[in-house]
Amino acid sequence: MNFDFRKISHQSFIYKLTIWEQQKFTGYFTVRTLSGVEWKFYLCIGRLIWVTGGNHVTRQLYRHLFQEKLKLDLDKILQEQSRSPNKRNFKYGWDYQVINTLVARKKLDNDRAKQVIRNIVLENLFDVIQYEAREILSYAEFPADLNKSFINFIKIFPIKPLLLEVIENWTQWQSSKLSSIFLDSAPLLKEKEKIKEKMSPKAYQQMVKLTNGKRSLREVANLIKKQEIQVVRSLVPFLQNGTIQLVNIPDFPHPKIKSEAQKDVASHQTIKQIVCIDDSLQVYTTMRDIIQEAGYEFIGVRDPVRALGVLIDRQPDLIFLDLVMPVINGYELCRQIRRVSKLKDIPIVILTSGRIDRWRSKIAGASDCTNKPIDKEKILRKIEQFLPSAHPKNSVVKTEEILPNRSIIA
């Protein structure tokens, strides 16, 4: 497929993924929709290792391993994995560890494991692109130090070939006018009598079995060994006349993991979050280095239009806000922040360059101001002023071991 990556929007998911490839990013980043659906993308030197997330993590894993006829006890597999001596800060998620463990035990062929991983990656890429057509996405970036990471992956994938395949699938999906149909939804037969009259008994029984509202469209396609687009196309007439409806179904229970990962999450939750809203890459980089070195979680928002959504989602402990930005200036954004009940008490420090700015900032609802260009000592004093009880220096080393160099780009 011929596709010109140069013509895609700089705000699009595809563009951001190609940039991470060009920058040879190592670590993971998250993609999150406004409705709360989230994925994690794991990369090593700009190549994809694994993608996990969406609405059906466990269902997806079982579906792709079903062909192997493996009887999986996920709890047992993961408990054994958690006791492994090779535990370091660059992990790829519990579902990946299941596949890796099955390969190590020779219960899953290495070549087949690579294909399973590739298929799951492609599915998640497709889902993100489909969600982006409906919702705004936000991105969180978590770089890892390659030299300090335990690298244990089955295969790494160049990003562009995967994207080309997904773009082609998405184009077919759109041309078939299926954009609004999500593959993690389940078909539910509502008017059984209408269908029964028009089908043979065998075909009717098959239809009832497949459209009981308990299997996702992907699971139905997998069960009858047909392409997903073929299955959905065949259901369109029934969806249009209301004979079949699509319903949301929950994921299978995730395994109960009593491991260091849970301790990591608990520790992560105690770390204070500081947001910097500034469209300048130089300011973003400087503030990120200062804040992370001090032991806080850095959230850098370079698109002011998306800032309010990120703030509502993250509810940080402190906000640094630039005044001069495109589309919306700092005064107006500060006023908008103060109108949101969940955000009205969060300290806002304006990054300014003049006394008049300071006066107007106070009127807009800012807590304080600090001068540009960025001065490390002044920034640290402001942090100490508004987060005096955080004591980040006591947890810097531990924090870096858990999630080093945390940052968000939105």
Image (spheres, rainbow, N blue to C red):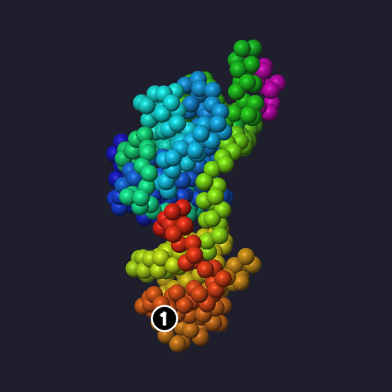
Q: Indicate the position of residue 154 as horizontal and vertical percent values.
A: 36, 34
* Quarter location, residue 254: top right
Q: Residue furthest right?
A: 193
The quarter of the picture where residue 315 lies is bottom right
Q: Which one is in front, 29 or 182?
A: 29
Residue under label 1, please give it: 371
Confirm whether residue 395 shows in the render: yes
Whether the magenta-drawn stretch holds residue 357 is answered as no
- Residue 121 position in % (x across, y down): 42, 37
Residue in front for this viewpoint, 140 or 263: 263
Determine whether 149 is above or below 123 in the image: below
Q: Amino acid at mark 1?
A: Asn
Position of residue 274 relative to residue 58, above or below, is below
> Quadrant of the image for the C terminus?
bottom left
Q: Residue at x 49, y 73 (%)?
A: 383
In the rendered structure, which segment of residues is drawn in magenta? 189-200
